[in-house]
Amino acid sequence: MRCPALSIVLVAACSSAPAPAQHPQVTAQTAPADAAIDAAPDAGVPEAVANAPAWVFRYSTAQRAETWTLRYHGDAALLTVETAQGTQRYVGSAADGATLKLDVSTGTAKLALECKHAKRPLSAKCNDKKAKPIEVLDCYHPDFKEPMPFGPAPGVEYVVSGSCNGYRLASGS
């Protein structure tokens, strides 16, 4: 029984007609959803979210620098993560109550954060316990023990360097 099936396969394999293209070339119209979202700043984001105040957290060490920017309004959220490798845009839902719960996605990666409304003493000086407390969102990521405190732009920065090992207000740059 295998011989006839094998003969058919051989005949089909020996056909002189060119095989039709199986995969279209990637063009701007057929780019993956992520590429379209990442390329267009407003894609899939309500105008109220795009224009909402920015809450920013920066992480800065010799090995890694990241800027996380959160905007939310009503039940929608946008989280942009900028790293040396590029920018990822997460779009999804926000539920603000006793905590702010974010459920966002790039289309290929999902992220859930739970943020507590809090106040932290912060200034341009590292770990300034005497600074005036400012409103922050202490957001908890499953991969980190400590929260990521997002502050109104220019935001809060966690720094590990020779002059600072802790939190301070981010500079305006």
Image: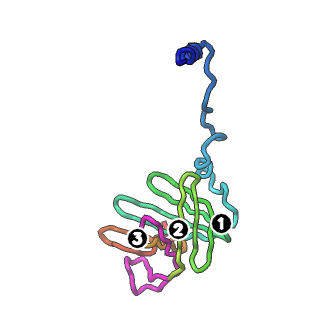
**Residue in the image at 60% along x and 44% along y:** 32
Residue under numbered circle 1: 76
Quadrant of residue 112 within the rendered picture: bottom right
Residue 130: assigned label: none
Badge 2: residue crowd in 10 Å (few <14, some 14–19, many ≥20): some
Report if residue 70 lies within the magenta region: no
- Answer above or below: position of 153 versus 11: below
Residue 156 percent across, percent down from the top left: 47, 72
Residue type beneath disc 1: Ala
Query: Which range of residues does the magenta coloring cover?
Result: 119-144
**CA separation, marks 2 and 1?**
14 Å
**Is disc 3 placed on a helix, strand or loop?**
loop
Residue 91 percent across, percent down from the top left: 61, 60
**Residue in the image at 46% along x and 56% along y:** 83
Single out the residue that lies furthest toward the left: 162
**Is disc 2 placed on a helix, strand or loop?**
strand
**Residues under numbered marks 3 and 1 in contact, where contact means CB atoms less than 8 Å apart:** no
Badge 3: residue crowd in 10 Å (few <14, some 14–19, many ≥20): few
Task: Say whether residue 170 is left or right of residue 8.
Answer: left
Mark toward the viewer: 3 or 1 = 3
- Answer above or below: position of 105 versus 25: below
**Is disc 1 placed on a helix, strand or loop?**
strand
**Residues under numbered marks 3 and 2 in contact, where contact means CB atoms less than 8 Å apart:** no
Residue 113: assigned label: 2
Residue 50 percent across, percent down from the top left: 65, 63
Residue 100 percent across, percent down from the top left: 58, 74
Q: Earlier in the sequence, mark 3 or mark 2?
A: 2
Mark toward the viewer: 2 or 1 = 2
